[in-house]
Image (tube, helix red, strand yellow):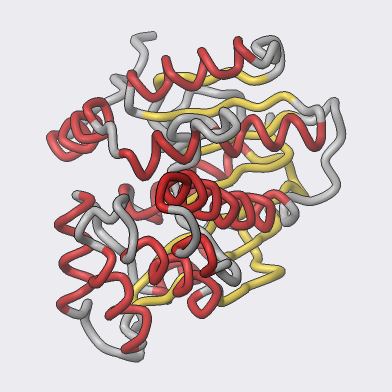
Amino acid sequence: MTASPVLSTYYQHSVADYWNTEKNPVNLRLGEVDGIYHHHYGIGEVDWSVLEGPEDTREKRIIEELHRLEHAQADLLIGQLGALRPEHRVMDAGCGRGGSSLLVNLRYGCQVDGVSISESQVAFANEQAAKRGVSDKVRFHFRNMLDTGFEPGSFQAIWNNESTMYVELSLLFAAHARLLARGGRYVCITGCYNDAYGLPSRAVSQINAHYICDIHPRSTYFKEMAANRLVPIDVIDLTAATIPYWELRAKTHLATGIEQAFLEAYKDGSFQYLLIAADRI
């Protein structure tokens, strides 16, 4: 039997190309704080004093504060994964440079498989696992999360941290439902556009163009979960909690130019930042 290609569409190739060459300081400099490289945003109250004080240490303070907010987001997601034990196997779908996978292993001791369509991200993440001496438990794979090739029912938990906007949700949740054991947990944190607002706003369209993604409407998450035996048990609106992160980032040397679009979309109600936890029935 011939293995499915990891990249099967022109769009997937374009996304892979973007992340293979991405070296954004807002991702790399923050990860250098403690060797945990995230590819997501932050939540929580900001310590605005980082913008004050001695200029020669201001950059370091800003980087550490943004990284603290990233960690808070990851900790919230990880806490929703259920009662994991060392013998469990879990999957990080769209793993980036592997930060969340390493944290899950650190907290629960379980086996983690991260998947990404970016070969450079996979190589980087495996290097980080090796540096931490956990390569026997945390492995990263150049695979497509829509067709990983892993055994059905082999995972106790799966998560997407800001990676669902790169795929069709009907295909994604069908794939996750096949891989999850019955009673297993699925968690995602994602930006989604607010159906009550109408079609995607201008700011949401700017975000799509910036990241080469396709932000889904909020309703599609729940529709496709219901169609694929994933029953939400917790939904947390993190929109208000993430705005301070974006306000801080917009005032720093790490701003990328997309900050105002996020702030506009969150504040006018056209865009929401949600955590959804669901059980596989």
Q: Quadrant of residue 24?
A: top left
Q: Position of residue 264 (x, y in %)?
A: 27, 80
In the image, residue 42 sits, relative to residue 182, either above or below, namely below
Nearer the observer, 213 or 217: 213
Q: Residue at x 28, y 65 (%)?
A: 259
Quarter of the image that includes the N terminus: top left
Left or right, 51 with respect to 152, comes to left
The answer to which of 119 and 132 lies nearer the viewer is 132
Task: Give the image quarter of residue 3.
Answer: top left
Q: Where is residue 177 shown, x and y percent of the image?
A: 58, 46
Q: The C terminus lies in which quarter of the figure?
A: bottom right
Please tell me which residue lies in front, 128 or 91: 128
Q: Is residue 77 left or right of residue 214?
A: right
User: Could you tell me residue 69's position as x and y percent?
Assistant: 56, 57
Q: Is residue 246 above or below residue 96?
A: below
* Residue 163, visible in the rendered structure: no
Query: What residue do we see at 30% from left, 63% from top?
Result: 215
Determine if residue 149 is in view.
yes
Residue pictured at 52% horizontal, 15% vertical: 126
Position of 191 relative to 188 (above/below): below
Residue drawn at x 71%, y 17% as measured from the top left: 137
The mark tally for this picture is: 0
In percent of width and height, residue 271 lies at 35, 77
Q: Is residue 130 above or below residue 176?
A: above
